[in-house]
Amino acid sequence: MIDVKIGDLTVSNDAPLLVIAGPCQLESEDHAQMIAGQMAENCKAAGAQFIFKGSYDKANRTSVNGVRGLGMDEGLRVMQSVKDAIGCPVLTDIHSPDQCATVADVCDVMQIPAFLCRQTDLLLAAGETGAVINVKKGQFLAPWDMPNVVAKIESTGNKRILLTERGATFGYNTLVADMRSLPTMAKTGYPVVMDATHSVQQPGGQGGSSGGQREFAPVMARAAVSLGIAAVFIETHEAPDTAPSDGPNMIPLDQMGKLVKSLMDFDALAKADPLRV
């Protein structure tokens, strides 16, 4: 299994669990630091590794009226403030090749959104920065298609890659998560991540925005971690019902401490007796 170093963290399918968590959309400096600080405390108490995530632009909102976020310049300023104040690595999405170098100057991990996971120019530009690249598997791809995505990034000489499962399209406004995809993608050797909150999303399910079933997000997280993966991706907010995006599938912040602790119990059990396919 490949180890990916992110600052002081070691991310691997064999290493202690990494929790990637934060709000769907960055809202303000104070808000980001509040969530990052609370999650850093939760993860430290449970023995989990932690990366803060937040998006400066939600470029694929269902409706043209959907709130997109702070924008790249302000968003990166907020992310730098989180790094400075909390001392944790940070992750954000990128959407076009011209954003890659600027984002890599601030963020430790750049994330390729699922809808863009086959965009060759974006993958190459991201890889060329040398930053860690987290690719979300498209809702339209099979897990055994991901080696082709990996090869594009590897062609730049960058082998700092994470692969994320976030559900597959299953009819209209519905996703399903096939747990077989996690060990299948792990065959690449790269760290595998389970996106527990987007996998319970209902894309476009509310007409002008996406719905979701947040009550099942902890189920997805626990099921995936019990298989022995590198990381779990969870969006969280102190008041999901009033969040500007993805509220229906985000886990309330006050529930995250208990959840992370339980995930570490599952992680220890899985990694004491690794399952390989």
Image (cartoon, helix red, strand yellow):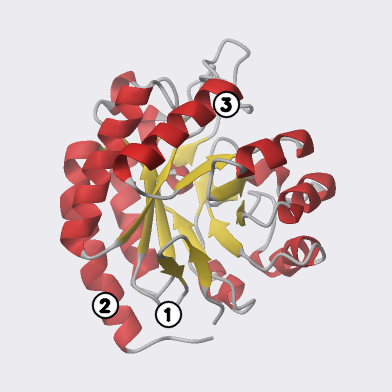
Could you tell whether 236 is left or right of 244 in the image? Answer: left
Does residue 25 sit above or below 100 in this rendering?
Answer: above
Which residue corresponds to mark 3?
Answer: 57
Report crowding for label 3: few under 14, some 14 to 19, many 20 or more residues within 10 A (C-alpha). many
Asked if residue 105 lies left or right of residue 6, the reply is: right
Q: Residue 74 in the image: x percent, y percent?
A: 52, 21
Which residue is farthest front? 84
Label 1: which residue?
14
Label 1, label 3: how many angstroms apart (C-alpha)?
33 Å
Q: Is residue 247 left or right of residue 97?
A: left
Residue in the image at 83% along x and 50% along y: 120
Q: Residue 213: horizontal and vertical position, in percent? A: 36, 39
Type of the residue with mark 2: Ala
Q: Amino acid at mark 1?
A: Asp
Pick the front one: 268 or 110: 110
Distance of label 2 from label 1 (alpha carbons): 10 Å
